[in-house]
Amino acid sequence: MKKFIFSIFILFIFTNLQSQTQDSGEPGAFLKNGFSARANAMGQAFVSIADDASAIFYNPGGMINIKSTSITGMYSKLFNDVDGVNYGTFGIVNNFDFGIVGFGVVYMSVNDIPYVENETGPTGINFNSNQSVFYLSYTKYFLDNLNIGGSFKFLNQSLAEYSGSGWGLDLGVYSNVNKNITVGLLFQDLIAPKVKINNSEDVYNTKVKFGFVYKPIPELKISPEAIFETGKDEIFAIGAEYLLFKDILAIRSGYNTTYNSFSAGAGIKYKYVALDYSFNTHKYLGNVNRFGLRLDF
């Protein structure tokens, strides 16, 4: 394999895009950028909400909330003042007679990275780095107040002319305890993906996410969440969503200890169309704006 020497700036981008609370270089760290603007505005404390198409990613058991068809999409430019670093998601869920099926995709691209052979500097040749995950999710009514769903995942990663792929499985549990409390549990990467590029192999770690939603009044959701991973400190998040004007306007806020991120946002919904926005602070990326679209038929 040719020796890649990145400029200091590009190395900074890669290091921090892959960074975590304790260390850097975790496989799949780019997925911590989230899957919907709505969930990001709530600190991604979404495992126990999961009531739209983003349930594909946050808790496939929550797809039981989809009565017909739900679509979600998000776009984010991770570095607001840097071109060529893009992140986006798309998901669609449909309720069939045989069960509820979802398809989703997450991608991140870093374009026009300068190739440097030695200390003389860039050669004038650029290359790209791309990461993507495809989801196929399924759930079916299990019990009146308890549901289980799964997401099969196919991952692909490329760096210049090298590429690798792998697959994994998420398992989600979703329970409506009563009209005021909902509980969510996700075993993320229960079957852990392994992605090998040239002579390097990334092995994903299994994570357990647990949270609940409490509704003190019908218009307000409060969702604390905890994430557990062997050998690492626990991650905590909390989010809130308040609905106004007969659910037309939503005000959201949250906090996530992954990157000491505070978040806020809003959404406006008319009939089956919703537009969402989130503003997140980030330890490494600075302030990040995310925009989302939801269609719930």
Image: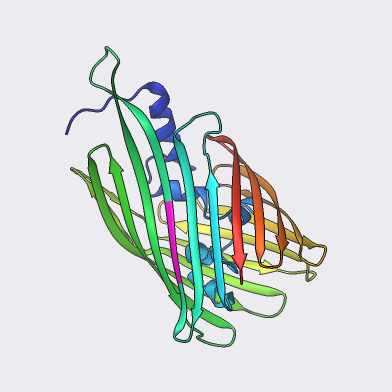
Q: Nearer the viewer, residue 226 or 267?
A: 267
Would you say residue 261 sits in the magenta stretch?
no
177 up-or-down from 40: above or below: below
Q: Point out residue 141 in the picture as x, y percentages from the top left corner.
A: 51, 85
Q: Main secondary structure of the magenta part?
A: strand
Residue at horizontal 59 percent and vertical 84 percent from the top: 145
Q: Quadrant of the C terminus?
A: bottom right
Q: Position of residue 75 (x, y in %)?
A: 53, 47
Q: How is the image coloured?
A: rainbow
Position of residue 146 measured from the top left corner of the image (x, y, whole percent): 55, 82
Q: Residue, x 28% and y 57% (percent of image)?
A: 166
Task: Answer with the quarter of the image where residue 206 lies.
Answer: bottom left
Identified at 31% across, 58% down, the residue is 193
Instruction: Work out which quarter of the rendered image holds the N terminus and state it.
Output: top left
Q: Is residue 272 left or right of residue 202?
A: right
Q: Which span of residues is magenta-colored?
A: 102-106
* In the rendered image, the vertical position of residue 113 relative to residue 243, given as above or below: above
Per the image, is 103 magenta?
A: yes
